[in-house]
């Protein structure tokens, strides 16, 4: 074999090897041809279903094929979806009607509605307390619902504009307070606030994820991710992220944190140790892909967005691009 041929072959093999390890990349785009905006997606850990908040309804698709498997209606201004699999129920936070819709996880039929504080935003199931909790964005409160009865059992006052909640699965909840640039710790057994922790110079916390093993919270703020010790509120690291982030996700198997940035990127952060973090990738996504969820079984990431019309050259400063009707879609990434 000639030396030049050998070199070309070696270069080709090296390139193939690099491409095979090229990091997180787009593997599928799921198109959903219906109008309206969106907020948080949610991957059901008990099934192969992906639930997508979409204006006044929730679209349900098969995570593998992307095929539609159902729609939940009557969820006006829906923000998020939570799953109480042990009870066979799902819950949606309906921001415009100030309530939660309860539905059957198998049939998707509505089972009822529960009143909450004003504009329920994030919603989650806490496995420790076996409760559904909403962050009432405009009310400064958390609504606690017992899925056994679908009754409100507590309203916890947390003054401020509330965003994402995370649980340590040991009796404590943590909630981002967007307008006060802090994280509030809550005792979910006593249903009371136990601490207010400043995020320092970081502003506008929205997304929040947690590593329950290292006891670290990951708060996505304006262009920065703050890593905080959830036992004492100490800030242990700050990592740069993209602009317009509204979501965070954590993969406990790979010790990786993700920030979905509305500017059209996804920041991938490696947890080297409990106190050391580094950006390993900045993945190109699409404008508007600001929220995110992860399937911890497959490690796939789901980011909803849409296509946008160009902003007119003579439009006033800060004019938002208009969404193209019917262009709602979900970007699927994996490594």
Image: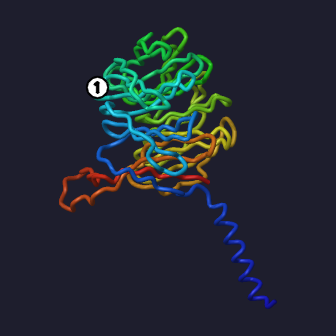
Q: Which residue is at 43% across, 35% downward?
A: 206
> Residue drawn 69% across and 77% down?
12
- Mark 1, other Cα within 10 Å: few <14 / some 14–19 / many ≥20: some
Left or right: residue 268 versus residue 115 is right
Please state the horizontal and vertical placement of residue 13, each as a whole percent of the image: 72, 74
- In the picture shown, does residue 243 fall above or below 73? below
Q: Is residue 180 visible?
A: no
- In the picture, the quarter occupied by the N terminus is bottom right
| Residue 125 percent across, percent down from the top left | 52, 24
Number of marks present in the image shown? 1
Q: Position of residue 275 (x, y in %)?
A: 66, 36
Residue marked by disc 1: 97
Looking at the picture, tell me which residue is in the foreground, 257 or 114: 114
Q: Find residue 18 and report its image quarter.
A: bottom right
Look at 40% across and 22% down and name the residue there.
111
Colour approach in the figure: rainbow
Question: Along the horizontal axis of the image, is 65 left or right of 159?
Answer: right
Q: Residue furthest bottom?
A: 2
Against 151, residue 13 (above or below) is: below
Residue extending farthest to the front is 107
């Amino acid at each position: 074999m000639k030396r030049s041929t050998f070199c070309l072959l070696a270069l080709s093999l090296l390139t193939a090897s690099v491409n095979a390890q090229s990091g997180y990349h787009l593997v599928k785009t799921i198109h959903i041809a219906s109008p309206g905006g969106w907020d948080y997606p949610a991957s059901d850990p008990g099934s192969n279903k992906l639930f997508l908040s979409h204006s006044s309804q929730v679209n349900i698709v098969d995570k593998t094929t992307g095929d539609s498997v159902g729609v939940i209606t009557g969820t006006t201004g829906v923000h998020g979806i939570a799953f109480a699999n042990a009870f066979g129920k799902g819950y949606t936070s309906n921001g415009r009607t100030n309530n939660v819709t309860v539905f059957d996880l198998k049939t998707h039929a509505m089972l009822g509605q529960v009143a909450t504080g004003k504009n329920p935003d994030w919603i989650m199931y806490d496995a420790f307390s076996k409760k559904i909790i909403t962050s009432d964005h405009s009310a400064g409160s958390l609504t606690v619902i017992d899925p056994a009865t679908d009754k409100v059992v507590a309203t916890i006052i947390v003054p401020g504009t509330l965003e994402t909640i995370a649980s340590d699965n040991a009796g404590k909840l943590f909630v981002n307070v967007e307008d006060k640039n802090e994280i509030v710790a809550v005792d979910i057994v006593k249903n009371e606030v136990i601490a207010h922790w400043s995020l320092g110079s970081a502003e506008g916390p929205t997304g929040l994820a947690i590593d329950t093993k290292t006891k670290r919270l990951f708060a996505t703020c304006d262009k920065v991710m703050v890593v905080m010790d959830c036992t004492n509120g100490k800030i242990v690291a700050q990592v740069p992220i993209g602009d317009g982030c509204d979501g965070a996700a954590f993969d406990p198997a790979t010790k990786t944190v993700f920030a979905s940035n509305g500017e059209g990127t996804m920041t991938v952060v490696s947890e080297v140790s409990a106190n050391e973090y580094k950006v390993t990738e900045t993945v190109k996504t699409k404008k508007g892909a600001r929220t995110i969820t992860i399937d911890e079984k497959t490690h796939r990431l789901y980011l909803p967005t849409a296509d946008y019309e160009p902003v007119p050259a003579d439009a006033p400063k800060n004019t938002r691009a208009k969404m193209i009707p019917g262009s709602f879609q979900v970007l699927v990434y994996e490594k």
